[in-house]
Image (cartoon, grey):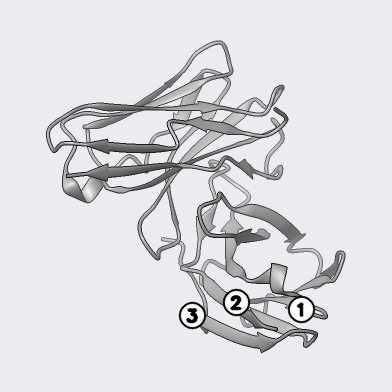
Amino acid sequence: GAGVSQSPSNKVTEKGKDVELRCDPISGHTALYWYRQSLGQGLEFLIYFQGNSAPDKSGLPSDRFSAERTGGSVSTLTIQRTQQEDSAVYLCASSGRAHQETQYFGPGTRLLVL
Amino acid sequence: GESVGLHLPTLSVQEGDNSIINCAYSNSASDYFIWYKQESGKGPQFIIDIRSNMDKRQGQRVTVLLNKTVKHLSLQIAATQPGDSAVYFCAENTPTGANNLFFGTGTRLTVIP
C-alpha cells in the first residue's frame, strides 16, 4: 500500500510480558516517528529515526521502552515487562528527510495490558 | 517545555454551518504548525499546515489562521459536513532539534445533520 502500515492492529497482553509493535513507513521516507496516544489525549512523542539512527530518544518513558530501525525502513517498538499504564494507542508516522516535512500517520496499534 | 492546548474540548455545529476550532501554543520559537483530523479508530490525517512567515493559508474548505502575537492558531471549516465529524489536533514544531511534533489535547467536532 501507499501509506504507513502498522501491525498488529490490536494487542492484548498480560502485565509483565514483552510486546513488539511494527511500523512500515511510506516507501522512500527516511524519517520515522513513534508517538503514544492515551485514551482521550493528544499524541505524546516517543522517538524519532533519521535513517537507522535515532538522534532523539527523549520521549521514551522508561528503559523498558526501546526501538530499532533496520534497512532504513521497518521499525520495531519493544516494550519489556509491560505495565497497565502502557495501555494506549501507539502511532507511527513517516516523512521525508527535510526538516518539517509533513508527517503521515499509520492507523496505530491498540495495546491493552491486563 | 512546549505546550499546545485547545480552548474548546467539544464543538457541535449544524451541517452547512462554518466551524472554527481554536488552539493556543506557548512556545514562541515554534515556526511550523499543523492541523490533523482523527476519526475514531484511525490515525491522524494531515489537513493543512502553516509556517510562521504566514498568517493565513487556505485549502479545500479549510483555512488556517496564525496569530503569532497572541500565540493562537485556528482552523476554519467551511460548509461543515457530517464527514467532518472527528477529533481535530493542532501540533507545533520548532526550527531546531528533532522533527517531532507537540500535540494539543484535541477538540471533538460533531456535525448535526
Question: In terms of secondary structure, where does tag 2 sit?
Answer: strand
Q: Measuring from the top left, give residue A107's x and y in whole percent.
A: 54, 43
Mark linked to residue B80: 1
Please tell me in which quadrant of the rendered image residue B77 appears.
bottom right
Label 1 resides on the chain identified as B
Pointer 3 local density, CA inside 10 Å: few below 14, some 14–19, many at least 20: some
Asked if residue B113 lies left or right of residue A76, the reply is right
Asked if residue B29 lies left or right of residue B49, the reply is left
**Vertical arrangement, residue A51 with respect to residue A88, above or below:** above
Question: In terms of secondary structure, where does tag 3 sit?
Answer: loop
Q: Measuring from the top left, give residue B71's x and y in whole percent.
A: 61, 76
Can residue A6 be seen from the camera position used here? yes
Distance of label 2 from label 1 (alpha carbons): 10 Å
Q: Residue at x 86, y 64 (%)?
A: B59
Please tell me in which quadrant of the rendered image residue B14 appears.
bottom right
Asked if residue A50 lies left or right of residue A79, the reply is right
Mark linked to residue B9: 3
Distance of label 3 from label 2 (alpha carbons): 9 Å
Q: Which residue is mark 2?
A: B109
Q: Measuring from the top left, give residue B10's x and y in whole percent.
A: 52, 82
